[in-house]
Image (tube, grey):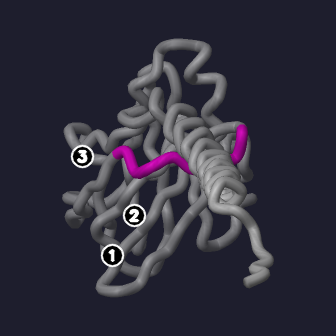
Amino acid sequence: MNKKGISAIVAEVLIILLTIVVAGIVSIVIVGNVQNWTHDTSECFPYKDYFTFDTSLGYTCYDTTQQLTSVAVQSLGGKEEIDEKVAGFDLVFHDQGSTIVKHVRDQDASGYTAPADGVWMAQSYTSNIQIAKGGNTFSYVYRGGKRYSPVEIYPVLTSGRVCPVTDRVNINVCEGGIALINP
């Protein structure tokens, strides 16, 4: 009987080589994804509590007469190397199934120069946006036409990365309305 084929030893070697190649490909894919995930996570880690809503001042509320939502945003910064990487934040307004995202960036147009549905600074609605950094608290106003609640805040870095939510607040009706200041 004249059988042609590969020997058992050659078959074993081919199976081992095939296993090594598959393991190498799988490890390259997994290591690459883990490195991307850890970079994404580590870039945002210093900002996990960076912005909070300050409800103690009475400026985080909805004015039913003017149809304005005001939020007092406090930064927990203070380290220059962390503060300088903050480009702004995203405010996410929720209302019974609908969501509005407002991008608030340092030096954006504010007040009269901002879009009608834009965000501006309560401290001065004629100057450009300033982002609360270094432990400061600034109030921002949004004319949404209705009461949104809750509102969330997401830090945005100069790299363009939007970090996970750092705070969420329910918006109550203002007592006495929102006073806009124009220094």
Q: In which quarter of the image is the C terminus?
A: top right
From the image, tell me which residue sits under label 2. 69
Residue 39 located left or right of residue 137: right
Q: Residues within 10 Å of mark 3 (few under 14, many from 20)?
A: some
Q: What amino acid type is highlighted by mark number 2? A: Thr
Q: Which residues lie in the magenta part?
A: 159-166
Residue 94's mark?
A: none
Magenta part, dominant SS: loop
Residue at the image point whose x is 60% and y is 51% from the top: 23
List the single residue furthest toward the front.
1
Vertical relation: 166 (above or below) 174? above
Query: Quarter of the image holding residue 107?
Result: top right
Which callout, 3 or 2, points at the residue further toward the start of the chain?
3
Cα distance in 3D space between marks 2 and 1: 7 Å
How dense is the environment of label 2, judged by Cα within 10 Å: few (below 14), some, or many (20 and up)? Answer: many
Work out how far the residue at label 3 is from the one at label 1, CA to CA, in angstroms. 16 Å
Tell me, yes or no, whether the highlighted magenta stretch contains residue 2.
no
How many other residues sit within 10 Å of disc 1, few (<14), some (14-19) or many (≥20)? many
Q: Which residue is identified by label 1?
A: 147
Q: Is residue 110 left or right of residue 133?
A: right
